[in-house]
Amino acid sequence: MSVDPELSDDQTAIRDLFVGFFAREAPASVARASEPLGFDPTLWAQVREIGAPGMGVPTVFGGGGATLGDLAVVTEALGRSIAPVPLVEHLVAARLLATPDVVSGDAVATLALRPATDDGTWRLVPAGAVADVVVGLDGDELVVVRAAPPGSGPRNHASAPLADRSARVGVRDVIGTRAEFVRARDEWKLLLAATLAGLADAALDLGVEYVKSRQQFGVPIGSFQAVQHGLADLPALIDGARLLAHKAAWAGERAEPGRCDVDDNDVTDFSTLASMALLFATDTAGRATDRSLHFHGGYGFSAEYDIQLYYRRARGWPLVFDDPGRECLHLADRLWGPSTRAGDVHASGSR
Amino acid sequence: MDFELPPPTQEYRRQIKRIIAETVTPADIDLQHETGTFNCPALNRALAEHGMIERAVPGLGVGDPIELWMLFNELEKAAAPIDGLGVAVMIAGVVNHVGTEAQKQQILPSILSGEALVCMGLSEPDHGSDLASVTTRAVRDGDGWVINGAKMWTTMAHEARWLVLLTRTDIDAPKHRGLTMFMLPMETPGITVEPVFTMGTERTNATFYADVRVGDEWVLGEVNGGWQVLGVALAFERGVMGGTNPGVPLLRRFGAWAREAGIIDDPIARERMARVAIDNEVAALLTQRTASIAAKGGLPGLEGSMTKVFASEAYVKAAHWFQELAGPDGLLQLHEPGAAAEGWIEADARHAPVTTIQGGTSEINRNNIAERHLGLPRSGRE
């Protein structure tokens, strides 16, 4: 036994299954057709058929009993296809709720990433436009609210089904505390990190394919070093993002408390790793889509090319949560203790 | 994926930490920075006594394969010297991979005992990145060879017992197919060493070869197969043996100083420190991945290239950020009063750019990734 940074045989099988599934059922044309809402009910029905919505729920509740690492493999496959289904949010919410309709996916569930405002509104909830069930923080309580979704939301950068939702109106139950919310949000961070790693990998593939076929000056533009080197930086970032998401997933399954010693480069704390994974994957997806779009020249921003779909989601999906710079400051609080500067708006506990 | 170290490996790690703590003194480190020679004989001997060099050599099959990564990771985190040991361990792996039985018997024990270091005569004054064009000649002379030429960046040549030397043996063959690697004792007559001092503190060397006469027994690998031997060496070197986590001691030293200086409360400093911590984690994971491939008998050339580019460029970024955050105190050199982190920030700011060049420039590594990993057409060069 040793440190093994490769997928297990089971995870390889899950990857092949889901990469195949999304490639077949959700090519980029499906994401494109789902705009501006960003949700495809037919694709969600297919996702239900293969049993994905309840995969991460323990088997005693009728779920698939998958580990966080298995789920990261699934969401990475989703990211490759930028599939317009809210599986990341649903997987996380399902682990909190474990009710039969959520396990089966008959009801779409989501997680409000930020606490409710004083008047009881969860602002711009991911999948808020289509979710039947929303879990989130209201004060210090973790609550679940069941209510009919609006079915539409504000048009946005990522064509994501965002919408404001009420934390008070609907069938409401208190199911936990802030600690359980934080845990669920950490799971969301790591699963979105894996999603973004997949998105970045597919964006790199699009760029490589384009520069191999596009001819200028009588040669493929991919034979120019200026182009090659811009793309050659990306595989390390993508592999790094994937490895870090998987390390976070591994830490999230451990029973014993993790360590958080950056002086010795020894970090096994789940929350810390989930935050790091999200930040690194956000940066990676941003860079991969930026380089790939740029090397498409004018076609990159033309609506008919797929890379612009990836570009907008690479920025929009993580920003639903928060500014990466602010998340860095929260990470710094974990690593070096809270800032003592008076009036620092970023000081820990502000959210 | 499994990121847990099994108990014997954890014990191995604790043992390395203990040996470093017992043998590498602050005075040693200061001396290395004064002389530019990053080697600590007491450390090498202590590691060897505990069998740790043997356990780390890739492909030897003595220790848990991941121990290679762990040894250099711990040395680097502790800011202990790795230049001498890194090359020695790598070349031990190469000798084990391509050497004859006689070479293994003669060379390996001297390295595994921590007594002998190795230097590499690869680049030349006029041939660096285009290494396959080297012109140092080895010419047949009866049963042996006569070598003439000059090499640059022969780091540790002034301390090493062994020399790995890339020579041209067939001037008519295509450039990659006319090269032969030799492994020679440094005491072989005709070899001279001149020091070369650098901005990044390290002392390296220029080495000269005048009618150096050697027998066939010193050919490493096949005659005219030098390029393949080099490939083995680089696959072992890049991204495994040090050079991938220099950001760890940098962040530790900067963090401690920032706390004293009150800069730790500056949100700009905090954001950058957090980003450096993330890069350090990613660099460690990429290194672990590379080491794991090498451990299973693979030659992770591409993965090593990726790791090397990522880690060295992240180090440059971190050193630059921290020097700027320190303001004028970041300009002061080792042990000057008021120097940020006792001058380590300034030392890293000079050292970091070197790491994007030595062992293969970022550009050569990007060519490698673009052509072999992404499958892009070879760019305009022979």
Image (cartoon, grey):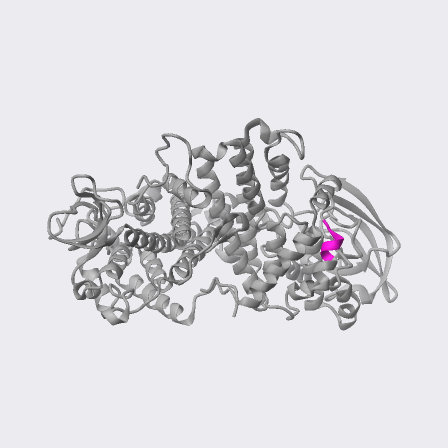
B118, above or below A301, in the image? below
Residue B137 location, quadrant? bottom right
Residue A219 seen from this side: no
B27, above or below B70, in the image? above
Q: Position of residue B247 (x, y in %)?
A: 56, 45
Which residues are the magenta region? B39-44
Q: Is the magenta stretch mostly helix, strand or loop?
A: helix
Q: Position of residue B350 (x, y in %)?
A: 63, 37
User: Which residue: 16% across, 60% down?
Assistant: A107
Residue B57 location, quadrant? bottom right
Q: Where is residue B345 in the image (x, y as percent from the top left)?
A: 60, 36
B41 falls in the magenta region: yes
Quick one: A348 or B3, which is closer to the camera?
A: A348
Q: Quadrant of the N terminus of chain B?
A: bottom left
Quick one: B94 or A258, which is closer to the camera?
A: A258
Residue B348 horizontal side relative to residue A190, left or right: right
Residue A156 horizontal side relative to residue B152, left or right: left
Quick one: B58 or A272, which is closer to the camera?
A: A272
Q: Where is residue A50 in the image (x, y as percent from the top left)?
A: 25, 68
B215, above or below B340, in the image? below
Residue A60 seen from this side: yes
Residue B142 horizontal side relative to residue A332, left or right: right
Quick one: B128 or B86, which is closer to the camera?
A: B86
B365 falls in the magenta region: no
Q: How many marks?
A: 0
Query: Seen from this angle, which residue lies furthest top?
Result: B328
User: Which residue: 58% across, 45% down?
Assistant: B249
